[in-house]
Image (cartoon, rainbow, N blue to C red):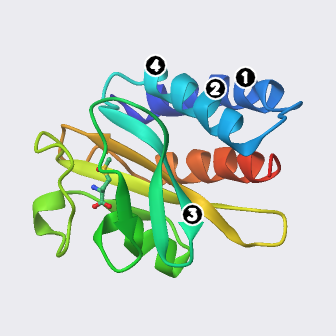
Amino acid sequence: MTTDEKRRIYNELLPEIESTLAECPDLISGMATVACILHHAFRQFFWTGFYRVVEPGLLAAGPYQGTLACLTITFERGVCGFCATTGETIIVDDVSKFEGYIACDSRTSSEIVVPVKGKTGELLGVLDIDSTELMAFDMIDAEFLEKVCRTLGECA
Ligand code: SME
């Protein structure tokens, strides 16, 4: 996929997501909606979904689309744990090179994880998108997915 094509798809999706979430009644409903819209927009998205902070230092699988997810992830482990700890987006070009990577599905080759924060900046969860392709994600994904997660944070 070219960067122009990627931008074009995100530019179409963003208003769709914003208008769909305009009357968001609940964070989990919002997460389910976003996972569905994103997953079906990009063929290279193999797993698209959320892990929610369910207690201090612990993430649990939230709404997702794709193959079976690991049920829980502690903040000390994996790409999701790294994102939850730092509160920053992380792009992993090749998951086999990431120490402590959690392989929920061995077909995943690269991933991006973006934090979802509430109105006061508290961490609500993370958006995790996996691809079977190496280096599937770049700063364009980060820029748009961070906007999506900011919109979602308003649902809380
Ligand atoms: N690979 C992630 C775990 C979640 S799944 O890929 C669905 C990680 O290392 O945090």
Q: Mark 4 highlights which residue? A: 40
Front residue of this view, candidates 80 and 62: 62
Q: Mark 1 highlights which residue? A: 16
Circle 3 residues within 10 Å: few <14, some 14–19, many ≥20: some
Q: Position of residue 22 (x, y in %)?
A: 87, 32
Residue 93 seen by the camera:
yes
- Left/right placement of residue 149 relative to residue 119 reads left
Front residue of this view, candidates 97 and 12: 97
Residue 13 image label:
2
Dot 1: element: helix
Type of amino acid at the residue the image marks with label 4:
His
Dot 2: element: helix
Q: Mark 3 highlights which residue? A: 54
Q: Position of residue 141 (x, y in %)?
A: 48, 46
Residue 25 found in image quarter: top right
Along the polypeptide, which appears first: circle 4 or circle 3? 4
Compared to 90, does 67 lie above or below? above
